[in-house]
Amino acid sequence: MWISIDEHDSRPIYLQIIYQIKQQIRQGTLKPGDELPSVRELAHILGINMHTTRSAYLKLQEQKVISLRPGRRAVINRLTPSGDKQIQENLKIHLQELITDALLSGLSVNNIRQIVDRELEQI
Amino acid sequence: MWISIDEHDSRPIYLQIIYQIKQQIRQGTLKPGDELPSVRELAHILGINMHTTRSAYLKLQEQKVISLRPGRRAVINRLTPSGDKQIQENLKIHLQELITDALLSGLSVNNIRQIVDRELEQI
Amino acid sequence: MWISIDEHDSRPIYLQIIYQIKQQIRQGTLKPGDELPSVRELAHILGINMHTTRSAYLKLQEQKVISLRPGRRAVINRLTPSGDKQIQENLKIHLQELITDALLSGLSVNNIRQIVDRELEQI
Amino acid sequence: MWISIDEHDSRPIYLQIIYQIKQQIRQGTLKPGDELPSVRELAHILGINMHTTRSAYLKLQEQKVISLRPGRRAVINRLTPSGDKQIQENLKIHLQELITDALLSGLSVNNIRQIVDRELEQI
DNA sequence: GTGGTCTAGACCACT
DNA sequence: GTGGTCTAGACCACG
């Protein structure tokens, strides 16, 4: 499992970790049942503080992506298709913002559609 | 021009203002050349701190969406189709995150595509 | 608003804080819209570290009991009757454990029922 | 005697063991005088560490639910109706927390009473 | 002033 | 060795 911190990324470190772990689950590099490195290990590898990796793991636990239990390593959960309305709402709102931003930056509708389609096809 | 602050929105107020102004430009409610209310006026209308509206306007100026000149009102700029590669990259990255999140939350690809399409058609 | 830490309580401090805040909401001492003391303030009052009060507030935010936003104080949310099945399951399981424990400790069924009823009537 | 470890249960393994043994005593599957499997046996059956089963047995001994003597198997004790005030206090406090949590999660008083009654009737 | 993130180092409960 | 809790002190973004 490879994770890297981008110093020039404006997002907090723990969010970068969260996203990269999620990406690897989506891509199949990490599968349900797989163990993550311990908070201390990962912190050491990335050259950051233990608490920072921990806060990433905590968020992932909240989102039911991993399970944390004392004495054990973090484990990837199996996906639970919740069909939650709120998630759809969330996706919609963020999408609207992205599109608005892209349009105001000069991207054409076709341009945007192209980019979106390319991403959706990769799944 | 109507702007409203949502107390239950977790985003900072200044971002809510920025987004709503952008939305209105995209929808044509605000057009290039139009004047925005003064920092003081808007702050008063929304019942928030002047610094907050000011930081929203500053951000919009940075993004070249509006022009600020001392003693004058903020004015909406013309759209500058920059074709900037960075914007496309930005859109792509954020889109990937949105999609990854949606997938891990149990939304199907078709579900996501539906929501995306609906948003793109509204433009 | 009064919160007190019990040194002899085996539960972690942040859980004691969470429970007392919830209690006060249930009893009406704290109402939706009310502001909580800042993490630093509460930490100072209780003679504990800022991060400890923060972790309590964070958990309450997760559980949608309060809202946290930069630059603002924590605010009590309005109750959202979710009707979540998982909550009922949770209640059932914990209740079973409590009852099992009470029975093995020598309490009679009537004894337990009495205690339960007294609590339910107080609402 | 059947005990199973739930990997997705957030509670520590030793508590799961304790609870299941107590459950079986309450249900009559295990009776005073019955012998439990040895620490090593149980650990082997469950595929867990010996220290874990040992700590479960030790806790049960502390609570006077079983008796441990070197060279012998653990034995279920007779129930000792202690009438201890502390147990009632304990039950009351935990019950209050459960109810507070359930109420804040949107469950109605009637809902809670239903669940409680169903559990109490099963004894 | 507020909450949000990060570092550093400690001790505890669990496996 | 694992995660869980707590302390201490720093700097940043938001209002």
Image (cartoon, coloured by chain):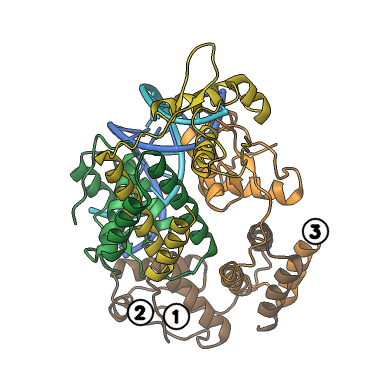
Chain colours: A green, B yellow, C orange, D brown, E blue, F cyan
Seen at 40% across and 28% down, the residue is: B64
Position above or below: D34 against A4: below
Q: Which residue is mark 2?
A: D72
Residue that carries the numbered disc 3 in the rendered image:
C122
User: Mark on residue D75?
Assistant: 1
Res C98 → quadrant: bottom right
Chain letter of disc 2 in the image: D
Q: Amino acid at mark 2?
A: Arg
Neighbour tally class for label 1: few under 14, some 14-19, many 20 plus, Cα within 10 Å: some
x and y percentages locating residue E1 in the rendered image: 56, 23
Q: State left or right for residue A13 relative to residue C16.
A: left
Q: Amino acid at mark 1?
A: Val
Asked whether the viewer can see residue C85, the reply is yes
Chain under label 1? D
Q: Residues within 10 Å of mark 3 (few under 14, many from 20)?
A: few
State the residue at coordinates (63%, 37%).
B2
Check disc 3 and give the amino acid type: Gln
Residue at 75 percent of width and 75 percent of height:
C110
In percent of width and height, residue A47 lies at 21, 39
Label 3 vs label 2: CA separation? 49 Å
